[in-house]
Amino acid sequence: MGGPAGWVSIAFPAILFLYFLGLMPQVALAPVLGGIDWVPSLGIRLAVLLDGLSMTFALLITGIGLAVTLYSARYLGDHPDYPRFVCYLLMFMVGMLGLVLSDDLIMLFVFWEVTTISSYLLIGFNADSAKSRRSALQALLVTGTGGLAMLGGMIILGNVAGTFQLSQILTMGDEIRAHPWYMAILLLVLAGTFTKSAQVPFHFWLPNAMAAPTPVSAYLHSATMVKAGVFLMARMNPTLGGTDAWFWILTLFGGVTAVFASVMAMRQTDIKQVLAYTTLMALGTLTMFIGAGTHYAIMAAMTFLVVHSLYKAALFLMIGIVDHATGTREAGVLGGLSKAMPLTGLAAALAAISMAGIPPMVGFIGKEFMYKAGLGLEGFGAFWVTMMAFAASVLMFAVGGIVALKPFRGDLRPTPHAPHEGPWPMLAGPLVLGALSLIFGLVPGVLGHYLVGPATHAVFGEVRPVELYLWGGINMALILSLLTFLAGWLVYRRHEAIRARLAAIEARSRVDFDAGWDRLLDGFKAFAAWLTGLIQTGSLQRYMAVTFATFVVLVGGTYILKGAFQAGLSLSTDGVHPVQWAVLGLIATGAILTVWTHSRMTAVAAMGVVGIGVALIFIMFSAPDVAITQLLVEVLVVVLVSLAMLRLPYLPRRSKMVFRTGHAVIAGGMGLVTTFLTISVLASDFDRRLTTYFEATSYPEAFGRNIVNVILVDFRALDTFGEITVVAIAAIAAFALLRGAPPRRKHEEES
Amino acid sequence: MELLLAITLGILVSTSVYLMLDRNVLRFLFGLVLLSNAVNLLIFAGGRLTAGAPPLIAPGEYAPTGVVANALPQALVLTAIVIGFGLLAFTLALVYRTFMTLGTVNSDEMRIAEPMDDKDPGTGKPGPGRADPQHPATGQEAGL
């Protein structure tokens, strides 16, 4: 049973399940609020909101979680990485619980992403398989991208509402729906929920996520992960719901997803894939009914939520047992297993009858209420929702037969292994879940009172009586149900022919979402390679040019936009001493000569001239210390460069020197910007406070009469220490570079 | 004087930038020297120009008498000059060592880390030394 890790993984959901079960009567009366401050400066609280909706989800998460951990302790207990698996699974469980319990939008988002990341790890658990890694990454990218969009929506929502607290936002529906940003919030949040809950056209990651171990599929597909999107739509219904946009987006996308997924489920041969597509169908149905938004529709959605979680988890766990026992999941191969695996067959039958919506299972109640809700709508909405629900239900009926009837009935067919009954930890979950489907069908009042009722209140935003019942008299919904059974039976009888037909259509079809996804990723990578090649050429010249040009454009552009050229026009050249003219002329000439010359020695000398000119300016304007340093350093520079020239090659000849017009433009721009910058700096007011402070305190506090020196060695001594460190490091690094330099290579450069 | 100084700074910066855009790293180095001079001068001038009044305190006084030159930028520039020197010395050693090892002072030919594989630098096609070369793996191959 997986050792200690297994017991921990079983105990954790079990304890939580009992805890939530104990809170249920209290929550059925009124929501529970609580929490602690997390990031008070941003107004983010670790706040808990436990109402009917959260309670329903919390019980599903921990209850089905218990079935799944029990199952996987046996299914994967011998796997060398089982403890790792348990970590991921519990992390996922905590993420899901945090998500459904949070009363803070930001906290909700954080837990949302916890589920995204842990589902990535779970789907990619068989990391040796490329298919598994691909599916995991696909799920991560699709849901992660949607999650980012959703974060944007939530931040806008939080700003519009003035709070991130959900329980407050839920009471502000009218204001938010009337707000001009409503549409942006709606679309961004729905981007998150539609990717997470795999609505068409974002559905393709979900069937691929079947690469995960079977218990994970059971968990992700029944009560968690994909239901997170449904949860959020339900949660947001009082705030964002009730508008035309909400109604049509949700019912159209949900309806299309439901029917598309049901048809695709008929097409599959691998039973696990069949179940994956029926999950899509359920998600579409839930989305459609949340979008429909009437009290009946919400009630139908909440009932179906529980119904689906029960039967889907059971079916997934069942097919895991069958796979384990026979070595195959192919619908065409399996048959006649009921004798060898009676208990598995019983669990499958209970779950599948609920899925098909046959009385007295709770699935029947779910379907009845869907029809009632659909018929209760107005105009085209009623037709659309009822039709979509009808079509999906017919196909579900047929799929129920394919999944649970066909593998167990008839003669035993040959399979890779001889079939045998599963062990009790694996059977317990599906049997209990199947039994619950039956029990809730027989006593629907309990379900209605404790779970569906409070959840419907939370989602609908207003308390109205909720009563679930099995027999509602002869009405339109019942007639539709009977029609469903008839049509479903016909489809089941001919399902192999239909599958072949669908396969043929699929082979001809050009639309392949999965291949499209590959093309999208390849396109991204090609774009990234192209962009990198464009920017990162490896040419130092180009990097420098881009850097300088950016400076010119940004600073110069700001000058032009702000019209700041006027600032320095009052400055004049009156009263400039001839010596000053001469020194500035010297600097300019030296600089130009350095560029112009093709002789290294001339260049070095010209640089020396510039340096000495700068030193002269320091002398003229009362900076003797700076001038001394400048002169010393300038001499050292000339000596060092000259020494290096003994070994370094000559500059290219003038004939080889090309005038680089583009670079000259950038350089000229830099010069112009510098000139204007200097003029505006010098023409603006000057704040002398710091200097005044140093002047006043230099002698009284530091006992120095040379203020510059005092600043260097006293007030800013740490800076000077840093400076010494820099020079020392430069010296050590230069020494390291020069030591052991290989003998110079012969090179034509020398010629 | 300020106007003239600003123009001189412009010339100094223009020449240094033009030099730094050269493929020849020696010329790049010259540009670096000029640029550090220009920047030092700019910082110095930013503290305003005061002629004939060094920031000293006369014996017997507790503070300078009358207006003296701004001491703060002088201290900053002093530090900058020394650090600029350190930078130059290190860069020079780097150029020297590079030339000894690679036999070139042309920055475009220093491509040990990112070989161009005879590709024109202008086309922007990365060489095989890059991550993700001309044949980016498809999603299937990369296991995505």
Image (cartoon, grey):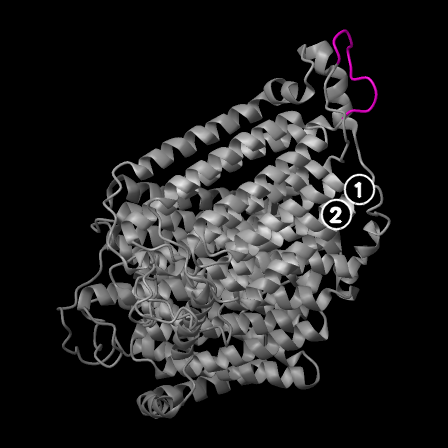
Please determine whether, in this image, residue A643 is positioned above or below residue A412: above
Please determine whether, in this image, residue A182 is positioned above or below residue A266: above
Residue nearest the observer in this picture, A536 or A412: A536
Q: Quadrant of residue A206?
A: bottom left
The residue labelled by disc 2 is B4
Chain of the residue on which disc 1 is drawn: A
Q: In the displayed structure, does residue A520 sit left or right of residue B16?
A: left
Q: Write the residue at 23% across / 45% down.
A: A743
At numbered mark 1, what does the secondary structure look like: helix, strand or loop? loop
Q: Nearer the viewer, mark 2 or mark 1?
A: 1
Residues at circles 2 and 1 in contact by the CB criterion of under 8 Å: yes
Count every numbered label the image shows and give the total. Answer: 2
Q: Write the residue at 28% across / 49% down.
A: B101
Residue nearest the observer in this picture, A615 or B56: A615
Quarter of the figure that contains the C terminus of chain A: bottom left
Q: Residues within 10 Å of mark 1 (few under 14, many from 20)?
A: few
The residue labelled by disc 1 is A576
How far across and down, in percent of the image, does residue A253 sit? 57, 77
Residue nearest the observer in this picture, A429 or B96: B96
Amino acid identity at mark 2: Leu
Q: Main secondary structure of the magenta part?
A: loop
Q: Write the residue at 81% across / 44% down.
A: A683
Q: Residues within 10 Å of mark 2 (few under 14, many from 20)?
A: some
Residue nearest the observer in this picture, A365 or A47: A47
| Residue A649 in view in this figure | yes
How far across and down, in percent of the image, does residue A20 sit? 51, 45
Q: In the displayed structure, does residue B4 sit left or right of residue A440?
A: right
Q: Which residues are magenta?
A: B58-68
Q: Disc 2 and disc 1: Cα gap in Å?
A: 9 Å
